[in-house]
Amino acid sequence: MTHPESKPTPSAAGQTILVTGLRGFTGQYLASRLRARGAQVIGLVQGEAKNAEEIRADLTDAASVKAAVTQVQPTHVVHLAGLAFVGHGDAQAFYAVNLFGTLHLLEALSTLKTPPQRILLASSANVYGTPAVEVIDESICPAPVNHYACSKLAMEHMAHTWLDKLPIVIARPFNYTGVGQDDKFLIPKIVSHFKRRAPFIELGNLDVSRDFSDVRDVVDRYVHLLLEAEGVAGQTFNVCSGQAHSLREIMALTEQLSGHSLDIRVNPAFVRANEVPRLLGSAARLQQHLGPFSPIPIKQTLRWMLES
């Protein structure tokens, strides 16, 4: 079961939901979930708009963001767009997109005659850095260790300056994966090696543990925070499974599911200097507001990815 228990699914008919990063991995799943509820979903996209459900805007250009927001007049907003690959080489780009891009969006939304009923901003659990605790809840003081995480924390602090004007909710997703995620991310890379029966794979530290969620669970939590949960404006929520799995475990599970074994080679180039050894989230605050939920097991997610 992946939905909060014993709650009917309300319709979102008549709502216009603006989603930045619509074409991205998470955006596609979120859009289909929202459309299934009857919402009109309009995506802010960087390239040419391909249809009436997309509108072109460059987040780093305040004027184009304002024009797009004015045209859409959204009732709700989900801001997913951002530079997410930690290994990206251009440090300034993280801040241009993740911090100032979000600022341009919030500035534009604040000028609407009817402000949105809720704005969900996707931050990241990377903001916590390497806290010396077993389980990370939202009370842990963030201490980011790379530019991606720094840009996300800066975005959160900036967003707090708008809380008196806009109903903002901040989500801090831990790692998540699923069908369609780029192979430069860890689990899709592993799955693709097993799918093509590769003889070996090069990985970094096999003993890092991560709290992995299924993308379908993550968008489910986002939808509930956006449309249903009460009293969440101004709050920050971990979005996680509450279970940590090491890379070694993921490899063993994928081998078991695929019936293929491959040689694991540790490549020192893939071992990050500031590697966070273990990231395990607490979903207690989220469950307080959404009700209890059971995450999709990682084995089920891996099977889905292998069979796609």
Image (cartoon, helix red, strand yellow):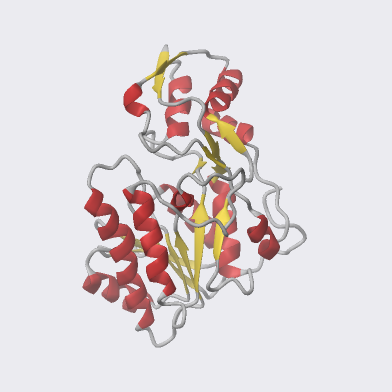
Foreground residue among 256 and 243: 243
| 99 w.r.t. 188: above or below | below
Foreground residue among 88 and 228: 88
* Residue closest to the far right: 6
Q: Position of residue 27 (x, y in %)?
A: 44, 54
Q: Position of residue 159 (x, y in %)?
A: 41, 70
* Residue closest to the far front: 132
Q: Where is residue 69, by image quadrant?
A: bottom left
Kindly tell me whether residue 199 is visible in this rendering: yes
Q: Position of residue 160 (x, y in %)?
A: 44, 72
Left or right: 50 in relation to 40 = left
| 118 w.r.t. 301: above or below | below
Q: Residue at x 63, y 40 (%)?
A: 243
Kindly tell me whether residue 53 is visible in this rendering: no
Q: Position of residue 246 (x, y in %)?
A: 55, 30
Foreground residue among 133 and 174: 133
Q: Residue at x 36, y 48 (%)?
A: 84
